[in-house]
């Protein structure tokens, strides 16, 4: 006999199943960031927007790609088409990707971070901000519909204009925020918390208006994920002060983050850059002078594998618990029927009580399954995604190193060219050429120095970030295990009450 | 008839020298591919212990021996149901077929549940006012040689041999309201009990799966911590604690399932089989009724010269039917009394055991919680 509610189809459990890697270069991936000209990001005037790549093999990208293209055919498309997979690296089309993009990313002043960290330490536990995401509401109809969430910030921090703020945001707004933060900070070595994932299946169901438990679950899962995402973001001392974050939490209106759509011009750009990145990763061989980084990278690789495995195990546990809940419901029903047909009065009563008790237990099992899921499975999922961000940061360091090396190479070439000029035979052009070369050499010397400084800076930042990450990791997991145990204790106490209530009923059978 | 032996061990003039409550089926050992059960009991007179080894065939022999076709009254007896044969696969794993056939009796460590079911069977035979007088039981419990070598008579117990047309008789209207009622109730209850038992089995199987999954989770976390060079010592501590928590969760499911099997599971299973036994007895009586009614008709239609013979036949049948019905009435009363008592015992011990386990586990969880709150964050 089927339970009243539809059991969520097994496919839903697969929504967050890792390891279901689609073939790597999926066309429609779009987890993060477009390169947008961001008016609020500081742009040091000294940076030329120029393709300085030694391997330049592509045309210089024109600005039109970077703006929201008015002729973008897909500007109105609201389909979110990516498939869940944390293996997708956050797609950044920012920063030095030697093959194609010009360098436009601003260099974040490291002192900003130091300051923020110091403040955090000085203030101790006055890190007082609490964000909640609630009240999901469907806006619109059909395939253009979307979910809007209420984002409430309660804080005593002075950087906010009020103590309590409330705005409405949709999913693409969150993605937009993440994309801005990623393009701003990631190349400097900051671990930017990843945004929750898109999901075709889940979202389509909601749009189509299917009001079953699986779409409610999906919305709840997403709401919870968005909340965790925001909390993680504001816990980062640098991100907390970022104007994008502040705007996100405070402004009643946000410009639509159109470029997060997969099929937009920005989406295509992301795809192209991802391919370029992949190629470059293979060709860059870094001479690691610092064993610490190598160790850390290995450590995180192991951690990643472990988390994924555990995540799969926990999801399996959740499935089994839901199954137990369903079976208990079935049993309760037949026990009730048995009780109804039973002639012996006391026995009939006891059987009916048994049925009621089992029904209550079914609910307990279900609640516990949700605890399993929302606490553990989602935590592990978040960390798998975070580790991807960590990997990204290591990659950025590698790129920075590579840039530095390239600059050194260039400098050397120029010097060689200068030396050659000494022995040239055309006196009329000689002086001009010599002057030019001298200018270029100075320029490249500057770049080499800058490259070295950048590399040192990013290494320093990463060390700090990893230190923070490790601390946060411990806090997060400890907090989850405690919450989980609290839920277990509560369930168990409830169970004891039920059994204690049933015992006299059973004994009363004469 | 309940297991705690609260009812009298001896029945008047029972002829059985063994105390019913002392009968224990202790364990089953595998001898090649035959299961051998060790049965102990005590003599009533001097409390001396007796121990014998029997195979399933011996039990079958007993069951067949209890039924004597030349004692028509015996047809009115509700025979204690013998569980189906347990086939052990070489790796002593339960296969699906066994699970389907035996349900709860297939679960539990080392055939423990099955042994308990056999034990109950023997005790019920020993407590039956009529059946306990049958020498076969004494033989089974005390003879040094196993009696099962004798080929058992094919019996009334083999319902599978019933032909389709006999099924029609099942719905044949009764002449007695008491029995009509009983037949209807029995039909209804048998079906409901069967379904309830199956669904409870599903619950238990799900619990067992959860136990395995939890253990797996606990072990893999443990393994990981052992292998990992603890770069983050605080994190490793948290993981170890988490592993222990899942170990406790596994224990919870394991014990809960065990309790379910050994109390309510067994109880429901027995109910189910006993109801089938009652059904069979009622069916036998119904068949006899059909025979009697046919004989009546024949007598009425018979020509003068045959009438006498027909009447003779009819009278014999009538006597048989009446004897059977009177026995049946007694048996039905007895049946209802004991099945309620049986279910009560099952429900009470189920509840008590689960309460114990729940309390134990709650304490463990609280311990874990305290320990986790003390975990260092650095």
Image (cartoon, grey):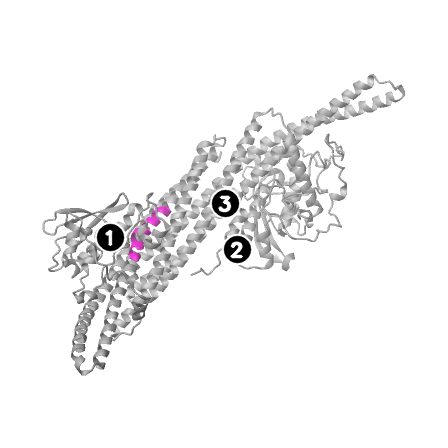
Is residue B365 visible in the rendered structure shown here? no
Instruction: Tell me which corner region of the image, top left, top right, bottom left or bottom right, holds residue B183.
Output: bottom left
How crowded pointer 2 is (Cα within 10 Å; few <14, some 14-19, many 20+) is rated as some
Q: Which mark is residue A214?
A: 2
The image shows residue A353 at horizontal and vertical percentages of 34, 61
Magenta stretch in the rendered image: B252-269
- Residue B343 place in picture, x, y as percent: 28, 59
- Is the C-beta separation of discs 3 and 1 under 8 Å? no
Q: Kindly identify which residue carries mark 1.
A: B118
What's the CA distance linking mark 2 and mark 3?
Answer: 17 Å
Query: The disc numbered 3 marks a residue on which chain?
Result: A
Q: In whole angstroms, how far apart are the C-alphas of marks 2 and 1?
A: 47 Å
SS assignment at label 1: helix
Helix, strand or loop at mark 2: helix
Residue furthest to the bottom: B304
Against B49, is B315 above or below? below
Q: Residue at x 54, y 40 (%)?
A: A384
- Label 3 secondary element: helix
Q: Going by the image, does B259 lie left or right of A313?
A: left
Residue B322 is tagged as: none
Q: Which residue is mark 3?
A: A377
- Out of A369 and B333, give the one closest to the viewer: B333
Residue at 31 percent of width and 63 percent of height? B190
* B23 to A98, vertically: above or below: below
């Amino acid at each position: 006999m089927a339970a009243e509610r539809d059991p969520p189809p097994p496919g839903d459990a697969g929504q967050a199943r890792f390891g279901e890697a689609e073939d790597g270069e999926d066309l429609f991936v779009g987890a993060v960031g477009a390169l947008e000209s961001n008016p609020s990001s500081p742009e040091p005037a000294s940076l030329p927007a120029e393709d300085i790549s030694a391997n330049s093999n592509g045309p210089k990208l024109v600005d039109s790609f970077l703006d929201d293209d008015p002729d973008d055919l897909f500007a109105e498309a609201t389909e979110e088409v990516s498939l869940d997979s944390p293996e997708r690296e956050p797609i950044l089309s920012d920063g030095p990707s030697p093959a194609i993009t010009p360098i436009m990313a601003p260099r974040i002043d490291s002192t900003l971070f130091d300051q923020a960290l110091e403040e955090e330490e000085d203030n101790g536990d006055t890190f007082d901000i609490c964000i909640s995401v609630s009240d999901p509401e469907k806006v619109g109809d059909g395939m253009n519909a979307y979910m809007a969430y209420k984002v409430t910030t309660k804080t005593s921090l002075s950087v906010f204009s009020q103590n309590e703020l409330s705005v409405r945001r949709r999913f693409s707004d969150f993605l937009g925020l993440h994309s801005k933060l990623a393009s701003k900070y990631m190349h400097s070595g900051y671990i930017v918390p990843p945004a929750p994932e898109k999901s075709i299946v889940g979202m389509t169901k909601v749009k189509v208006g299917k009001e079953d438990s699986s779409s409610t679950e999906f919305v709840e899962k997403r709401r919870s994920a968005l909340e965790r995402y925001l909390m993680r973001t504001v816990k980062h001392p640098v991100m907390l002060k970022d104007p994008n974050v502040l705007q996100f939490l405070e402004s009643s209106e946000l410009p639509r983050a159109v470029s997060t759509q997969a099929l937009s011009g920005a989406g295509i750009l992301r795809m192209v850059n991802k391919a370029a990145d992949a190629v470059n990763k293979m060709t860059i061989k870094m001479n690691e002078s610092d064993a610490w980084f190598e160790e850390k990278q290995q450590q995180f690789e192991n951690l990643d594998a472990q988390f994924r495995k555990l995540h799969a195990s926990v999801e399996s546990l959740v499935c089994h618990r839901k199954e137990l809940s369903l079976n208990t419901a079935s049993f309760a029903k037949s026990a009730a029927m048995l009780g109804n047909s039973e002639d012996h009065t006391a026995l009939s009563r006891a059987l009916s009580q048994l049925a009621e008790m089992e029904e209550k237990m079914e609910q307990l099992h279900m609640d516990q399954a949700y605890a399993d899921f929302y606490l553990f499975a989602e935590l592990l999922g978040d960390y798998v995604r975070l580790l991807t961000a960590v990997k990204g940061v290591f990659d950025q360091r590698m790129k920075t190193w590579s840039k530095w090396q390239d600059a050194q190479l260039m400098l050397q070439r120029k010097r060689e060219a200068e030396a050659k000029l000494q022995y040239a035979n055309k006196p009329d052009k000689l002086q001009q050429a010599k002057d030019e070369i001298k200018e270029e050499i100075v320029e490249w010397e500057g770049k080499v120095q800058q490259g070295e400084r950048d590399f040192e800076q990013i290494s320093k930042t990463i060390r700090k970030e990893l230190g923070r990450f490790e601390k946060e990791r411990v806090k997060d997991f400890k907090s989850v295990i405690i919450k989980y145990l609290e839920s277990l204790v509560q369930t168990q106490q409830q169970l004891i009450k039920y059994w204690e209530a049933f015992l006299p009923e059973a004994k009363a059978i004469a | 008839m309940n297991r705690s032996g609260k009812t009298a061990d001896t029945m008047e003039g029972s002829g059985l020298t063994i105390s019913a409550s002392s009968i224990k089926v202790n364990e089953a050992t595998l001898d090649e591919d035959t299961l051998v059960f060790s049965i102990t009991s005590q003599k009533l007179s001097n409390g001396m212990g007796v121990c014998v080894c029997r195979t399933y065939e011996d039990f079958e022999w007993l069951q067949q021996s209890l039924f004597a076709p030349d004692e028509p009254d015996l047809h009115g007896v509700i025979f204690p149901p013998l569980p189906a044969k347990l086939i052990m696969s070489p790796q002593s794993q339960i296969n699906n077929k066994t699970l389907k056939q035996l349900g709860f009796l297939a679960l539990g460590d080392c055939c423990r549940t099955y042994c308990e079911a056999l034990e109950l069977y023997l005790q019920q035979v020993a407590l039956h006012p009529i059946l306990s007088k049958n020498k076969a039981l004494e033989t089974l419990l005390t003879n040094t040689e196993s009696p099962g070598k004798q080929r058992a008579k094919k019996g009334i117990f083999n319902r599978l041999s019933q032909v389709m047309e006999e099924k029609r008789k099942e719905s044949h209207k009764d002449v007695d309201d008491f029995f009509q009622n009983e037949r209807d109730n029995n039909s209804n209850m048998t079906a409901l009990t069967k379904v309830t038992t199956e669904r409870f089995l599903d619950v238990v199987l799900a619990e067992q799966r959860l136990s395995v999954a939890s253990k797996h989770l606990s072990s893999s976390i443990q393994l990981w911590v052992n292998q990992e060079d603890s770069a983050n010592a605080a994190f490793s501590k948290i993981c170890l604690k988490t592993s222990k928590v899942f170990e406790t969760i596994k224990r919870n499911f394991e014990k809960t399932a065990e309790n379910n099997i050994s109390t309510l599971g067994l109880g429901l299973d027995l109910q189910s089989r006993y109801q089938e036994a009652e059904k069979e007895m009622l069916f036998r009586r119904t068949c006899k009724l059909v025979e009697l009614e046919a004989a009546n008709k024949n007598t009425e239609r018979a020509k003068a010269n045959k009438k006498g013979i027909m009447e003779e036949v009819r009278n014999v049948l009538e006597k048989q039917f009446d004897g059977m019905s009177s026995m049946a009435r007694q048996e039905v009363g007895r049946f209802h009394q004991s099945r309620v008592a049986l279910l009560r015992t099952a429900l009470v011990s189920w509840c008590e055991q689960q309460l114990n386990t729940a309390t134990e586990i709650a304490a463990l969880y609280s311990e874990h919680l305290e320990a986790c709150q003390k975990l260092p964050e650095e």
